[in-house]
Image (spheres, helix red, strand yellow):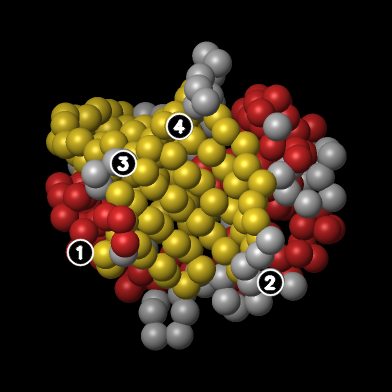
Amino acid sequence: MRKMVALLLVLIALLGLTARAESNASIVRLSGLALSYVEPGGARSVRFNSASMRIALGTSEGAPTIQATFDNGEGQAVDGVAQIVGREILLSMGGITGTYAVDLETFATEGNSGDDIAKGLSGALSLAGAHLDVVLYAITREEANGMRALEVPLPVPQLITAAEGLLSVTAGMDATQDMDMDELRERMENMGEDAMLGFRYNASTGAFELAAVQGGRGMRLSGTMEMSFEPTTFIDITDDEEKYDLLHMPPEVLEQLRGELNMILTKFVNFADGSGLNGIIP
């Protein structure tokens, strides 16, 4: 399952931490996690009984920020930060030198420029940082048994472009040596246009599901979600002097990033193997 693990982790993990600023923020704590591969005939799942994630949403020095900590429950934790500045997303992670930027124009679609996407994300993050419960209620619809649900289409062509860039970063690393990169690229190129991201949440029980599905097949993360509003120490990466374009890195920067990522991804791949993830994705 090294294929999916490496992709998911790179999206979380392209992240050197710098100055800190404290402010009130919405906090989301995820526990009792399970990852499933769903298909028309059913689902195969694996549970992470000790793993957890803490996500803080708010504003650091004026920059809308998401800060996440993944703890595998075995003494290993990874902190990652994403901030929106202008039309860029800045990414940083403990153990990785420097800050990496992604121009949101990469994800532009007809009728939505990179600036439009940045404004929308900034507004949503700022509002969620103060009133996450209100935002979730406003954007979801009510279903049976107290569940609230939301589905949004995924911009497949833009995601493919970003994923291909990330694959070029991880190519040749020890942690991904068992992955068939050509097969992964072929899978991405053959993706259609109908991928959907779905979210379901029960405020009474805390149960949640987050699924990315295409043609009835995809991945689903489920577990328990707790929300609170409390003082949080944010990591501010907006002034980091070492900033690189994630999708257009000089060779020497790419080699440095690969070396640092390799150490982190090796730990996660070992965790994934030990958790039984290898058996759930064909």
Distance, label 4 to label 3, CA atoms, is 11 Å
Distance, label 3 to label 2, CA atoms, is 33 Å
Horizontal and vertical percent for residue 209? 44, 50
Q: In this figure, which residue is indicated by the disc labeled 2?
A: 191
Distance, label 4 to label 1, CA atoms, is 26 Å
- At x 40%, y 58%, the residue is 199
Q: Earlier in the sequence, mark 3 or mark 1?
A: 1
Q: Is residue 197 above or below residue 268?
A: below
Q: Nearer the viewer, mark 3 or mark 1?
A: 3
Report if the CB atoms under discs 3 and 1 are less than 8 Å apart. no
Dividing the picture into quadrants, the one containing residue 32 is: top left
Distance, label 3 to label 1, CA atoms, is 17 Å
- Answer few, some or many: residues within 10 Å of disc 3's Cα (few below 14, many 20 plus, some between 14 and 19): some
Q: Nearer the viewer, mark 3 or mark 2?
A: 3
Q: In this figure, which residue is indicated by the disc labeled 4?
A: 32
Q: Amino acid at mark 2?
A: Met
Q: Quadrant of the N terminus?
A: top right
Horizontal and vertical percent for residue 61? 20, 42
Q: In this figure, which residue is indicated by the disc labeled 1?
A: 138
- Answer few, some or many: residues within 10 Å of disc 4's Cα (few below 14, many 20 plus, some between 14 and 19): some
Q: Amino acid at mark 4?
A: Gly
Judge by depth and name the residue closer to the eye, 234 or 151: 151
Q: Amino acid at mark 3?
A: Gly
- Answer few, some or many: residues within 10 Å of disc 1's Cα (few below 14, many 20 plus, some between 14 and 19): few
